[in-house]
Image (tube, helix red, strand yellow):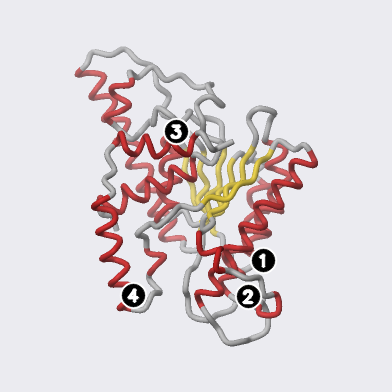
Amino acid sequence: MPLFAHQRLHINSAVTRVLSAGYLRRDRVMSAPCLLPHSICHCIHFLSPELALQHGKVAIVTGGTRGIGYETSRHMASLGAHIIIAGQNELKGVSAVKRICEENREAKDLISVLCIVFKLMVCVCFVFSVEFDQLNLASLQSVRQFVQNIKRRGLPLHILVNNAAVMLVPEGRTEEGFERHFGVNYLGHFLLTLLLLDTLKHSGKRGSCSRVVTLSSSAHGAGEIQLDSLLNRRCYSAHAAYSQSKLALLLFSSHLQQRLDRGGFPVSSCAVDPGMVDTSLYCHLFPTARLAQTAIAHLLFRVHTHTHTQFKQTYNSMHKDSF
């Protein structure tokens, strides 16, 4: 289903946090031509003035069929990157790929019309590629199979966005018997990142490093790592389980960066808190809590107006702290 305007605009703010996590900066990559005047760039979301074209770059986005993952995939595709959406539901994956392709074609048509109206002679490359590959983060075997499929094709990998997550789900276990929040949010991404690390190292270059961007949450502050609860059944708390998984992701992202620094590898690891975003991730809240969350979210999103200028300012404020 299409997102409401207030949802999409606020998700775009979260996507900015993901994209501005230090990789897609125009001062870092200046390889592809862009001769469009800034006045036209400001009129459309197809090419943000702050983000460099990404032709030749390959990105994997887990959970890219909806919410922040979808918008991140859509935006990077519009910049020319080859996007691999990794998800469990094939129907949703195919639908996401189709929508992204259609939206990028519409953007291309809009630019063509503007060029005709303003009699502009420009040269812009619209090459982009989006595909879907199945990945079940609740199954470590599925993670290994996904990585095998990627490596068998000999593709480089420049960006890995660990975005997929479950939140406040009823008590459940992964195929290997781990608590579901910890298994999906952390263990699946942990294994995925480690198995793809060699590819990321080989794809990165000095001054243009590969990136591992992990979606964190402010909920990590309430988290506490309890190793004995990962396999053994105890009194279950969905909030505690979710917070623990996000804390584990934050610790992993930080430790990975330390190891990469010590090894001198052209790969960076960072964790990004997207903030409060009105997505389907809240679907497991109790009905009354969900109703309250929706009402508060609508109020916040209406008050926090996202014009293009404000969106740009939001990006610039994080752009300076990206490195």
- Cβ–Cβ below 8 Å for labels 2 and 1? yes
Q: Does label 2 or label 1 sit earlier along the sequence?
A: 1
Q: Which residue is mark 4?
A: 289
Quarter-of-image position of residue 157: top right
Q: CA distance from mark 3 to mark 1?
A: 33 Å
Q: Which residue is mark 3?
A: 79
Camera-near label (1 vs 4) is 4
Q: Which mark is residue 141?
A: 1
Which residue is outermost to the left? 117
Q: Which amino acid lies under the numbered mark 2 shown in the image of this protein?
A: Glu
Q: CA distance from mark 2 to mark 3?
A: 37 Å
Q: Does label 2 or label 3 sit earlier along the sequence?
A: 3
Disc 1 element: helix
Q: CA distance from mark 2 to mark 4?
A: 30 Å
Q: Does label 2 or label 4 sit earlier along the sequence?
A: 2
Q: Which amino acid lies under the numbered mark 3 shown in the image of this protein?
A: Leu
Q: Which amino acid lies under the numbered mark 4 shown in the image of this protein?
A: Ala
Query: Which residue is at 27% across, 39% downward?
Result: 307
Residue 320, given in percent of the width and then of the height, sits at: 51, 33
